Amino acid sequence: MPEDLRLRVAETEDLTPSVRRFVLVDPAGGSLPGYRSGAHVSVTTPAGHRRSYSLVEPGSRAPRRYVLCVRRDTGGRGGSVSMHDDVAAGDELAVSEPANAFPLRRARRYLFVAGGIGITPVRSMVGELRERGGAAVTVLYLTRSPEETAFLDEFSADGSVVHHSALHGRLDLWPHLAEPDDDARVYCCGPTELVEEVLALTVHWRPSRVHVEDFAGVDPLGGRRLPFTAVWAPTGARVEVGEDTTLLAALGRAGIAVDASCASGTCGTCRLRLLGGEAEHRDLVLTGEERGGFVMPCVSRARSRELVVAPVDDPVTPVDPVGPGGPAPGAPVPGASTRI
């Protein structure tokens, strides 16, 4: 995996009482790795948390800065609080290169539904589309109140629907989603309740036209929870993962330490190599291409009876997993001799 960048905080600004904007630059003044709209970076906070934040400006091949916005969540796991309380202009932070699990795809028409801080990836996408021209863009920006609406003036002036639930109640999304459109794409980012509502209201749409990102992360024990066996490739240790525990926790209890931070499938810290078996990917980090060779043990599980996993940056000792879901006895572990 690429090493983190050391970026300087050039500027901070409070957009609302709970949302702060951070501008990150190369201390030497150079350009930064490029990204496409919808991308995010992972930041290590001064308190040691690893958190992912969307880049809020349109994608660029050689940007001079990364801009992200962080909502302070006092009920969270401490990452946002550290960003607000411990980071000041002039500080340097460890920041990953951009990754994109929520890419903007081509269409003739777009409907964006953003809830609260979910406006951050939407802002980058809408900015790119407006610069590019040629596509019809509708934005539904849902917040609780004007005071808690980041970029309020910007979205109020560009024709977007800005709706405040404290003043007007819930917005009825059905009129915007009732008629499926194969020439349109729906993008939704926001709290779990909003994402689930949009998914429920678009069950009659082609799945490939509906794209969602839940910034709250993934419930690690939600959905189907069948037990399975994890094989730790460097030693051949077999670890049972019960239905009431995560792969990450099971490895830890077996004495296998895996670096982790968010525990919700959003930061990418606990990424492991996937060498055998079929994973049930639940994370919000890996791209479709990456899911063939990696797994996030904090939230993802197994579709097969076994998963063969290994650290990303340590030598892999080939093992011969036996049983349903793994290769036959004596067969090599796929990918065990290769590294990235």
Image (cartoon, helix red, strand yellow):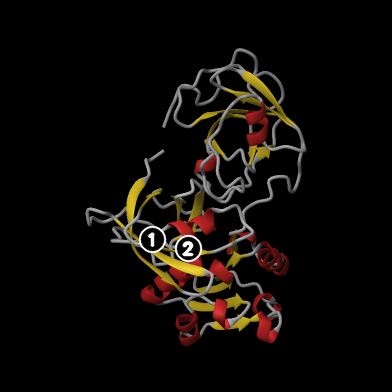
Q: Position of residue 62 (x, y in %)?
A: 28, 58
Residue that lies at the very extreme toward the front in this rendered image:
85
Name the amino acid, label 1.
Answer: Ala
Quadrant occupied by the C terminus: top left
Contact check, label 1 and label 2, Cβ < 8 Å: no
Residue at image position (50%, 85%) is 156
Q: Locate residue 330 relative to residue 86 in the image: left or right.
A: right
Q: Locate residue 28 relative to residue 336 in the image: left or right.
A: left
Name the amino acid, label 2.
Answer: Leu
The residue under label 2 is 104
Nearer to us in this view, 288 or 194:
194
Whether residue 42 is situated above or below residue 305 in the rendered picture? below
Residue at image position (67%, 62%) is 192
Residue that lies at the very extreme toward the top in this rendered image:
330
Check disc 1 and report its element: helix, strand or loop.
loop
Nearer to us in this view, 57 or 180:
57
